[in-house]
Amino acid sequence: CYADAITIQSRLVDVAPLVTRYRRDLAVSHNNLGMAQSEANKLSEARVSFEKALAAQEALAAGQPRDLSLASGLGGIYN
């Protein structure tokens, strides 16, 4: 369940905020939740999830501009 993943990943980010993988995984989970919500026609909830994913991924990409995988992840969220 995406909500469970988000809870766990949020805790990891709280404990270790500098671990890029944890922050990236959290952004991906928010994006995946948004996709599931969108498919279930829960559009306002999906928008919130997509906004959280986008904010998280933008912060990652801005903080590490030479990391092409983070830029690619940002592109995937915009997709």
Image (tube, rainbow, N blue to C red):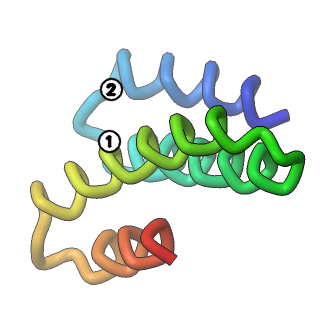
Q: Residue at x 77, y 39 (%)?
A: 42
- Across and down, in percent, residue 13 comes to 39, 27
Distance from disc 2 to disc 1, alpha carbons, whole Å, reads 6 Å
Label 1, secondary structure: give it.
loop
Q: Residue at x 51, y 77 (%)?
A: 79
Would you identify the image quadrant in which residue 71 lies?
A: bottom left
Which quadrant of the figure contains the N terminus? top right
Q: Residues within 10 Å of mark 2 (few under 14, many from 20)?
A: few
Q: Is residue 14 left or right of residue 38?
A: left
Residue, disc 2:
16
Pointer 2 and pointer 1: residues touching (CB < 8 Å)?
yes
Q: Which of 52 and 6 is in front in this view?
A: 52
- Across and down, in percent, residue 7 comes to 62, 20
Q: Residue at x 55, y 30 (%)?
A: 9
- The numbered mark at residue 40 is none
Q: Residue at x 11, y 72 (%)?
A: 65
Q: Which of 75 and 25 is in front in this view?
A: 75
Q: Residues within 10 Å of mark 1 (few under 14, many from 20)?
A: few
Kind of residue indicated by mark 2: Ala
- Across and down, in percent, residue 41 comes to 83, 47
Kind of residue indicated by mark 1: Val
Q: Is residue 67 left or right of residue 50?
A: left
Label 2, secondary structure: give it.
loop
Q: Is residue 36 left or right of residue 75?
A: right
Q: Nearer the viewer, residue 76 or 37?
A: 37
The vertical placement of 22 against 71, above or below, is: above
Would you identify the image quadrant in which residue 49 lies?
A: top right
The vertical placement of 13 against 40, above or below, is: above
- The numbered mark at residue 19 is 1
